Image (tube, helix red, strand yellow):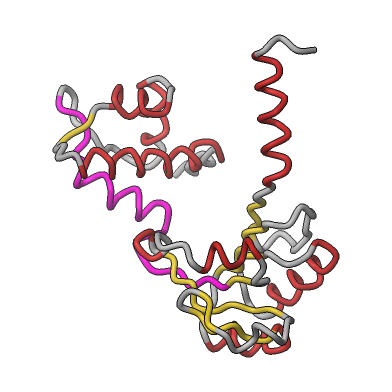
Amino acid sequence: MSERPPIPRATVKRLSLYLRGLERHQAEGAVTVSSRTLGSDLGITDAQVRRDLGYFGQFGQPGIGYSVDGLIPRIKSILKIDREWNAAVFGVGNIGRALLNYPRFGPKGFHIAAAFDINESIIGTKVGACQVCSLADLEEQVLAAEIDIGILCVPMPVAQEVADRMVTAGIRGVLNFTPRRIDVGKDVDVVSVDFSRALEQLAYQVAAADGED
């Protein structure tokens, strides 16, 4: 039996966008949605939508489209968010606090179960639904709370050190909000969110649209 071809990373990224589009159409009362509509939501072709979903099976019906109520749980299952993932915030500065107070992680399947910092003035205080723990207790608390995902918001000079401890404690995925590239080995996945780089790229695109050299 031939092996299934690897799924392009761009396809996986678009699955999240399809899911948001489907949830919006569901809220508007739609029963079915076409690949043309899903593609239009993202600014891509209907053929690309069918190609992306085709990696995972047959979902739609010709002439009818996709069942909104049926496709939403299928995509959630593909993305592995049909279960709850425990996450922890490391570094309770401005970004960490904003994430801890963000209300929509829960409905998306992510439970922020712990928060860590080294600042004695905030250790033991409550931010969002979490009581801030000392970073010295990282390994013990990650194990106790069964943390799967670590959200790294610490200062750049200590980012790699904290990431190493996260991985040693058993965390399997890191969302990196620091501007530093971290190396955690091939068995742990890292997604980096760099606000400065995003703004720099946006500034370039705006300037290019204005005809600036």
Q: What is the quadrant of residue 189 in the picture? A: bottom right
Where's the C terminus, which quadrant?
Answer: top right
Left or right for 20, reference 173: left
| Residue 210 drawn at (x, y percent) | 67, 12
**Residue 48 belongs to magenta span:** no
Identify which residue, 163 or 8, lies in the foreground. Answer: 163
Q: Quick check: 62 above or below 67?
A: above
Identify which residue is drawn at 22% across, 35% down. Answer: 66
Identify which residue is drawn at 67% across, 85% down. Answer: 139
Identify which residue, 32 or 108, lies in the foreground. Answer: 108
Magenta range: 64-88
Q: Quick check: 12 above or below 126?
A: above
Residue lying farthest to the right in this orientation: 157
Left or right for 129, reference 153: left
| Residue 9 drawn at (x, y percent) | 56, 40
**Residue 78 belongs to magenta span:** yes
